[in-house]
Each structure stands twice: as structure tokens, then as C-alpha cells.
Image (cartoon, grey):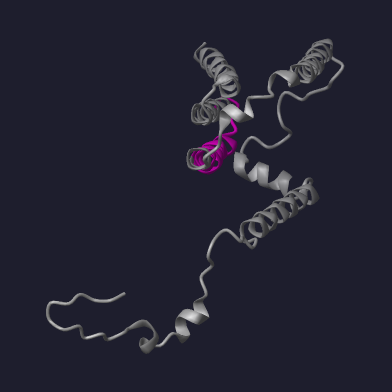
Amino acid sequence: MVQAFAFYLFAIVVIASGVMTIAARNPVHSVLWLILAFFNGAGLMLLLGAEFIAMLLVIVYVGAVAVLFLFVVMMLDVDFAELRAGFARYWPIGALLALVLLAEMVFAVVAWSAGGISVSPRAPVAHDMPNIQALGAVLFTRYLYIFEAAGLVLLVAMIGAIVLTHRTRRDVRPQNVSKQVRRRPEDAVRMTRPPVGQGVEL
């Protein structure tokens, strides 16, 4: 009874926070709703017995990704009124995609209820094997190539972000370290010795 109540509570909060993430007008509020969705998703993972995935949701997504989104949104000077200017013309495409996704979900639920999809209720692992050990055994044996491909994709994304960050910009004055090191005191200091009562001439 307690588990069922906790499941419905977490599920309702996840759905509500997901809807508010999309519907919120303030992007900072959207990120905060997203953090709430991650926390409740971690609660659902705990109910399923996947403690490692729950900790990943809290530590990686909430502690790194969502907080990074929050800081980026707060620091960027984005004109959101200008971004929403042409929002109405994309309503037909968005509604069509929403109907397609809704039809796919209804089809999946009906097929699963009819028994067309054979889903095992429990993973074929030993009862005495910890959750992290079982996940690692599957990840580094059966899904090893997919795991390495995901690592390569993240590596390419990281290199692309570094290249975009370190591009040459003409609107800023870059720092010339070698010129600063070669600078002598005679080039930086000028002794004028003005007489008493006379200011310094610039």
C-alpha cells in the first residue's frame, strides 16, 4: 500500500513538473521544474530497486546538467520576447508531432496489454548480485560497443564545444603574453619630476 501510494505520488509529480517545464514562460522556472522532475524520477527508480540509476539522476543530472542549464540561462542575455515572436506559425507542425507521439504511446500500451510484447517482469540476474555489479556486467559485456560509441559521441561534442569557444573574435582585444613578458620597465614608467605647484602633463 505504501509503495503504491509512493509510486502514484512520484509519477503525478513527474508528469506535472514535466508539463510545467514546457509551459513555464520564465526559462529559470523551467529549469527548476526540470530539477523537480529529476528528483521524482530518482524516487521512481528507488521503488524499482535501481539505486544506482537513482543516484545517477540526482548526482549527474541534478548536480551537473540542470545546474549548468540554470547558470547558462541566468547569464545569457537572451531576448525571449523575440524568440516567441514566430511561435504561432509552428502550431500545426507541433500538433501533428504531438498526435503522432500520442498514437505511438497508445499503440504501445494496447500491444503490451494484449500480450504482443513479451516483457520479462524481472531481469535474469542472481538475487545475491548487487544492482551496480549487475549493471556493470551487462554494460561492459553485451552493450560494450554501444557504450564505447556513446563515449566517442561525447568526445566529439566536447571537442566541438572547445573549438567553438576558442574561435578567433575580432570584437575583443586578446592578451599577448609574450609582448607583456618582453616589456621593459623603461617602456612602462616615465619620470617627469614636475616642479612644485605644477601638475603632471599627460
Residue 125 lies left or right of residue 184; in this view the side is right
- The C terminus sits in image quarter: bottom left
What is the chief secondary structure element of the magenta stretch? Answer: helix
Whether residue 191 is visible: yes
- Number of dots carrying numbers: 0
Kindly indicate the quadrant of the structure image that contains residue 10.
top right
x then y, percent, for residue 138: 73, 44
Tell me the magenta residue range.
Answer: 46-70
Q: Is residue 192 above or below residue 85?
A: below
Q: Is residue 12 above or below residue 130?
A: above
Q: Which of the two residues, 3 or 201, is positioned nearer the viewer here? A: 201
Q: Quadrant of residue 92?
A: top right
On whether residue 58 falls in the magenta region, the answer is yes
Coordinates of residue 117 in the picture (x, y in percent): 84, 20
Does the image show residue 45? no
Q: Is residue 88 left or right of residue 22?
A: right
Q: Could you tell me residue 178's position as x and y percent?
A: 52, 81
- Seen as rendered, the residue at the extreme front is 198
Residue closest to the eye, 3 or 59: 59
Residue 86 falls within the magenta-colored stretch? no
Q: Is residue 153 above or below residue 6?
A: below
Picture quadrant of residue 133 = top right
182 and 140: which is toward the camera? 182
Q: x, y percentage for residue 97?
A: 79, 20
- Residue drawn at x 56%, y 16% as measured from the top left: 16
State left or right for residue 162 relative to residue 105.
left
Q: On the rendered structure, is 120 left or right of 68?
A: right
